[in-house]
Image (tube, helix red, strand yellow):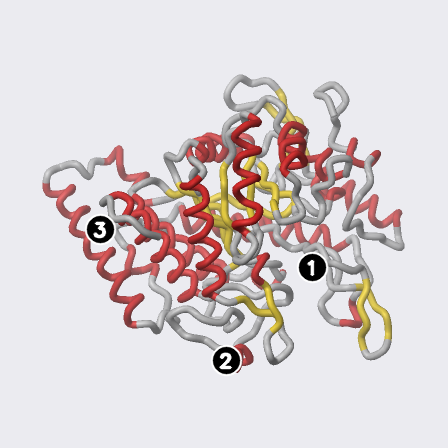
């Protein structure tokens, strides 16, 4: 790809992995035409703001927290699920900011994370071969509703729009006001230890804000910083026809020159199954102005990693690319050092984010997928240590989580075991951390950075 040859549709000349076959092509084209006509969901100014913040993350001046559902359901587009997800991200970012003493950039896996790659396009159900469930924007979870339907792409657009609208509304209405952090509390946090730790931070923050008010430092010009936060949306850029339809040639807010922006979300990533160098997804991602992520796992060769960086970020813009590493707690030491060295020698300055979820999926004794909290923490801890040993720095975490009281991952302060999973196992795809387990992760990372600030060794 070169700047002169790239177009939003140039990916169509490349091999497409994880493609969806629609039986009614005329209907698909009609839907894509409608999507291309609808207004953008995000604007270039928001995208540019995120790029600037991710540059700070890549330089070690901020920390990235990216989290949300494995695969969103259209049913999650409702007040309580949206608020619960925002609350847990706000709580986690407050804990991380307090411990690390650096800003936290928040990106939600939300308002568009409706599609999921699958290892096989079909599966057996009661002796009959049917399409695998690919996410709400492709087909239904019910075995009788597995035929891919283009109308679901339109539904995805409107559910994304409704979710973003509500998020913007409540964030602009004081939902994230630092003067009222107790209102972020979740009714499902049962652990006394977590509640006490969180309350300690809240009390210290409240005292600090009260002191600022007394000495006159809490001035009107600081009001926006204290009463609201930036929260950006993201999803895997899996469905390229959808992404193409929402790609617009718009003015760059910094200089007015027109550039190609994906306006379906602020941040997109390429999955581990779709990052082929000569593939359609890498081609598409190479032309958009959005900050992007690339999943990096054990199958990624060092040279391959550098080549994909050169394709999607030839100008080596700092923070343009987030490398989301997902190895497995027992494999990370084998692969991460080589990947770090390759990137350092390439001259690229990236955001290094640890995804401790995807490499640590296992089968429970009851037959459902789960993840061990201990393995998740182990991969994060090893990532921090390996980066430090290689003159690098872990810049963020990427988690599949929910603000609801689900029972999908074992371990944590709740001490869930395999027999507990059936209590509230809700996911349609991969297991997520619940609200308590998510706070566990935030506290453990925050405590590490607090010890670092105080010169206390250890992870």
Residue 323 is left or right of residue 37, and the answer is: left
Q: For residue 205, which numbered disc appears in the image?
A: 3
Q: CA distance from mark 3 to mark 2?
A: 36 Å
Cβ atoms at labels 1 and 3 below 8 Å apart: no
Cβ atoms at labels 3 and 2 below 8 Å apart: no
User: Residue at the location (54% across, 58% down)?
Assistant: 330
Residue 370 is left or right of residue 275, and the answer is: left
Disc 2 or 1, which lies upstream in sequence?
1
Question: Can you identify the residue that label 2 sits on?
Answer: 420
Disc 3 or 2, which lies upstream in sequence?
3
Query: In this orientation, does residue 252 appear?
Result: yes
- Element class at badge 3: helix
Question: Can you identify the residue that label 1 sits on?
Answer: 135
**Could you say where residue 208 lies in the image, as x and y percent from the top left?**
17, 47
Q: Nearer the viewer, mark 2 or mark 1?
A: 2
Q: Quadrant of the N terminus?
A: top right
Q: Quick one: label 1, few (<14), some, or many (20+) residues within 10 Å?
A: many
Establish if 242 lies above or below 412.
above
**Could you say where residue 391 lies in the image, as x and y percent from the top left?**
42, 35
User: Residue at the location (86% across, 70% down)?
Assistant: 129
- Element class at badge 1: loop
């Amino acid at each position: 790809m070169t700047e002169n040859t790239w177009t939003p549709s140039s990916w169509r000349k490349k091999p497409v992995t994880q493609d969806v076959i629609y039986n009614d092509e005329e209907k698909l084209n009609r839907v894509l035409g409608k999507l291309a006509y609808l207004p953008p969901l995000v604007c270039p100014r928001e995208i540019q703001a995120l790029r600037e913040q991710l540059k700070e993350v890549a330089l070690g001046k901020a920390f990235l927290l990216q989290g949300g559902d494995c695969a969103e359901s259209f049913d999650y587009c409702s007040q309580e699920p949206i608020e619960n997800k925002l609350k847990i991200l706000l709580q986690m970012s407050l804990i991380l900011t307090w411990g690390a003493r650096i800003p936290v950039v928040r990106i939600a896996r939300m308002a568009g994370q409706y599609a999921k790659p699958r290892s096989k396009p079909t599966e057996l159900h009661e002796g009959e071969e049917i399409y695998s469930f690919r996410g709400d924007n492709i087909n239904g979870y019910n075995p009788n509703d597995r035929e891919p339907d283009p109308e679901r792409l339109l539904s995805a657009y409107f559910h994304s729009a409704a979710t973003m609208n509500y998020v913007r509304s409540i964030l602009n209405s004081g939902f994230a006001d630092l003067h009222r952090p107790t209102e972020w509390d979740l009714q499902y946090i049962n652990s006394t230890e977590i509640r006490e730790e969180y309350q300690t931070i809240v009390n210290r923050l409240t005292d600090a804000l009260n002191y600022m008010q007394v000495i006159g430092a809490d001035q009107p010009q600081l009001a926006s910083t204290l009463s609201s936060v930036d929260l950006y949306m993201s999803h895997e850029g899996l469905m390229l026809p959808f992404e193409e339809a929402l790609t617009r040639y718009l003015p760059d807010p910094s200089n007015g020159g027109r550039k190609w922006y994906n306006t379906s979300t602020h941040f997109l990533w390429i999955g581990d199954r779709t990052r082929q160098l000569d593939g359609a997804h890498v081609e598409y991602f190479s032309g958009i102005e959005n900050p992007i992520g690339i999943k990096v796992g054990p199958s990624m060769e060092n040279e391959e990693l550098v080549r994909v960086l050169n394709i999607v970020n030839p100008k080596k813009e700092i923070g343009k690319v987030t490398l989301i590493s997902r190895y497995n707690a027992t494999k990370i030491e084998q692969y991460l050092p080589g990947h770090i060295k390759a990137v350092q020698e390439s001259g690229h300055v990236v955001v290094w984010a640890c995804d401790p979820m995807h490499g640590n999926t296992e089968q429970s004794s009851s037959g459902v997928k789960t993840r061990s909290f201990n393995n998740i923490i182990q991969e994060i801890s090893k990532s921090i240590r390996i980066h430090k040993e290689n003159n690098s720095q872990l810049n963020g975490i990427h988690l599949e989580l929910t603000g609801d009281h689900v029972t999908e991952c074992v371990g944590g302060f709740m001490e869930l075991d395999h027999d507990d999973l059936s209590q509230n196992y809700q996911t349609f795809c991969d297991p997520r951390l619940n609200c308590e387990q998510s706070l566990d992760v935030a506290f453990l990372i925050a405590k590490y950075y607090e010890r670092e600030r105080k010169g206390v060794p250890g992870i």
